[in-house]
Image (cartoon, coloured by chain):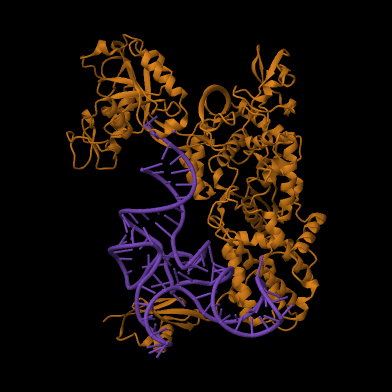
Amino acid sequence: MTESAHTALDLYDAAAIERKWQARWERDGTNHTDVDAGVRPYYTLMMFPYPSAEGLHVGNLFAFTGNDIHGRYQRQHGHTVFEPMGYDAFGIHSENYALKVGVNPMELIPRNIDNFRRQLKRAGLMIDWRYELSTTDPRYYKWTQWLILQLYKRGLAYKKRAAVNWCPNDKTVLANEQVINGVCERCGAKVEQRLLEQWFFRITDYAGRLLENLDHLDWSESTKSAQRNWIGRSEGAEIVFRLHDYLEFAGAATVMRTSTSEMSALPPTDIRVFTTRPDTVFGATYLVLAPEHPLVERITTDEERTSVDDYRARTARQDLVARKVTKEKTGVFTGAYAMNPANGQPIPIWIADYVLMEYGTGAIMAVPGHDERDFEFAKTFGLPIVRVVAGPRENERTPLTGAYTDSEDPAQLVNSGRFNGLVVSKAKAAIVEWLAEHDRGRAVVNYRLHDWCISRQRYWGPPIPFIYCDKCGVVPVPESDLPVKLPIVEDFQPDDSGISPLARVESWYRVKCPSCGGQGRRETDVSDTFLDSSWYYLRYPSAGRDDVAFDPVLTDKWLPVDSYIGGNEHAVLHLLYSRFVTMVLHDAGMLPFDEPFVKFRAHGTIVRDGAKMSKSRGNVVNPDEYIEEWGADAFRTYLMFLGPYEEGGDFQDRGISGVRRFLDRLWVSALEAQRSGAADVAVLRKLHKTIRKVTEDIPKLSYNTAIAAMMEYMNVLRAGERTPHVAETEPLIQLVAPFAPHVAEELWERFGHKRTIFDCGWPSFDPELAADELVTMAVQVNGKTRGTIQVAPEATQEDALAAAMAELAIARFVTADPARVIFVKGRLLNIVVKD
RNA sequence: GCCGAAGUGGUGGAACUGGUAGACGCGCUGGCUUCAGGAGCCAGUGGGCGCAAGCUCGUGGGGGUUCGAGUCCCCCCUUCGGCACCA
């Protein structure tokens, strides 16, 4: 090391360098994106954060840094990169915090945002701050409200009184996606069922398309799989069971061929059930309706009325936890009977809470012989169990000790009349066809996905833009009147009424009906935060435009998003809603594409010292402290080095020093680099291998191995305390730039460059230099490695064999003539000797 | 229960389409340098046996395919994530 490297001036002072370059970037507009004229647009997006009072979480920074590296790399490859940032600042999270500290979120949020912006700037992200947005800005939520109106126009937004998930703690409705194991995902309170008037989006209309498109998306497999599970497609059949007065028909061998007119002595009441096993219809020995099924009222007999009413009252009050935890079967008989359309047998109709009103038709045909839940129920209440499917070593009389649910090929039908002997797969189709001929069934596809409830009885969100008028009914707010501004409300504490705090602000909600001019009343619910985030990526290029939600020309140029990186916790919430909204706008002719994110990668999560970070554990990493101590460049690079990006990893305080040491050595190498003389060919070979490796790894998000490759090169560059050459050092600075942008800029400038390193291209590698001069081949005898040989990469089997036999250490294992030789060029030679 | 991901040194993690397991970093050991160091540099570092050359075992467990298996196939165990009375 030369003495000059020790002078104060030339110390690697990360803080000073980072301050200098952040100011420089701001002054020069280095991170500005020319959205109108920029060529080769590349839109790289990070999931915008919720600006919490605690400030930026290391997880946020992990996500953003990964995205930033990708963006900077694309820019070095000549793209005009757009890397915007915004804040998802509406919602219960912010509101609850505001309530806790007793400050209106309208005051609180801007403060949090200022803090976030400060922290984000310190991290050295390549963000064009001119396009920053916040979902709480009336200029943003004006268009969120506009979006609601677009869905309404297309019949995709509707209001209904429905049983919804009610969080008694947050005092609001939750979307299904926000209920985890029966508790509120936010506060953990047991979620209750409530009947409220709510606004819904008809996302179920898009279930099929949302599912099918997944096959063509370049997304993390785990995310696609989560969406598939969530959408939950089931193929099956709807089967009609006709209601009958059992007493009248008891004993009469009524079968399906009985004409409809003969059977309709009583008003025919069809009970439609959904099943994925239409092949088992002959084994349906009773029906079960969900307790809240609308037909229950009508079919219940006077004798059973009391017990049915009791049961319905009991299950209605039950919270979801109780329902899910105790899988014990309960239910009551309605007194009514239906006719099994396959065999004409009268079968009793029960109600039970194991049947869910929200799925299928809210009614099932129970086949206890072949469904575990039905079996359990039948056992509990002594209902008949009939075998209609038999396995390979069974027949129609083999007793059932439990439900036989196997439907794989040898399983075939028994006790099923003309369908006996058919394998299950064939029987399904045949029975559905037969039922369809008699108008008693049809093939249907069912989805688990529910419509999206967007109403929230809270304060901190965009008011849903409708007005209720006694004369005109529901009237959408005219688009020209948007935004419907959220008023400043002193008391925004929600209560148990199920009515939003906005309903207390009479001056706000009393308005003229836009249609008739009479007295009207605003909708007082606000919309779900997930609606805000379902379209923000469309807004960024047009942020600041007040005339449109998203400019068609800019949208065409920048969207869909080229690369989206975010957490998998949004696999079924944000990422599904965004796809839905994009599809709707596409169908409305407003977007030329119907998927918003061409490529999505779920990043991993960071734990610390093997444990999840949490305030109570006291192991939360505060980015500010680490940036203070090690510099943003070292912190960024360490975050990317601690594990595979898509898996996350373990943050260990000690680990960061290794990365900082690497940057220190880079610094010294660059300052010492010689201009005179020639570069070392062996070092250049390693350099070109490194360029190749880093160039390939960054697009794959294999950041940890890219950094490892650069460290490896550093070890070669400085081996034996040699003084590196400029030609050996300069390209390395370019490789490091996406990870450690400040120090790279500084060194780049010291190398005499005038423009930002990010506009000076990416080093290319010379394949010939990157290739090895000599390769080390493993030599095995009978599959055991006995030594290595150095040969030219293109050495033939004969060359390699000769070289191997020349090595005594190897040759001594070759005790006879080789029976076989396996040769993998440049890699391995295996001499097989028979003994 | 269903779906997805994953089990590799003391530790975080590498390993291309089956081809020298443990790259790179942390830690540790020894040495050099230093007034000093939570600094820098050099060397070593999977286990066992051996003075050594070397031998041998080794990627959660058990089988298998192969000249050759961390990687492929079958069975099992464990961890993490998602869904879950979804008919």
Judging by colour alone, the chain drawn in purple in this rendered image is: B
Of residues A165 and A549, the one drawn nearer to the viewer in this rendering: A165
| Residue name at image x 52 percent, y 27 percent | A164
Q: Is the residue A4 above or below the residue A811 in the image?
A: above
**Which x, y percent locates residue A615?**
60, 48
Q: Is the residue A87 above or below the residue A24 in the image?
A: above
Q: Is the residue A51 above or below the residue A320 in the image?
A: below
Direction from residue A388 to residue A63 in the image, left or right: right
| Residue name at image x 37 percent, y 13 percent | A305
Direction from residue A172 to residue A741 in the image, left or right: right
| Rendered-image quadrant of the C terminus of chain A | bottom left
Q: Is the residue A470 above or below the residue A130 in the image?
A: above
| Rendered-image quadrant of the N terminus of chain A | bottom right
The image quarter containing residue B31 is bottom right
**Which x, y percent locates residue A190?**
51, 32
**Which x, y percent locates residue A91?**
64, 35
Of residues A678 and A556, the one drawn nearer to the viewer in this rendering: A678
| Residue name at image x 63 percent, y 30 percent | A527
Judging by colour alone, the chain drawn in orange in this rendered image is: A
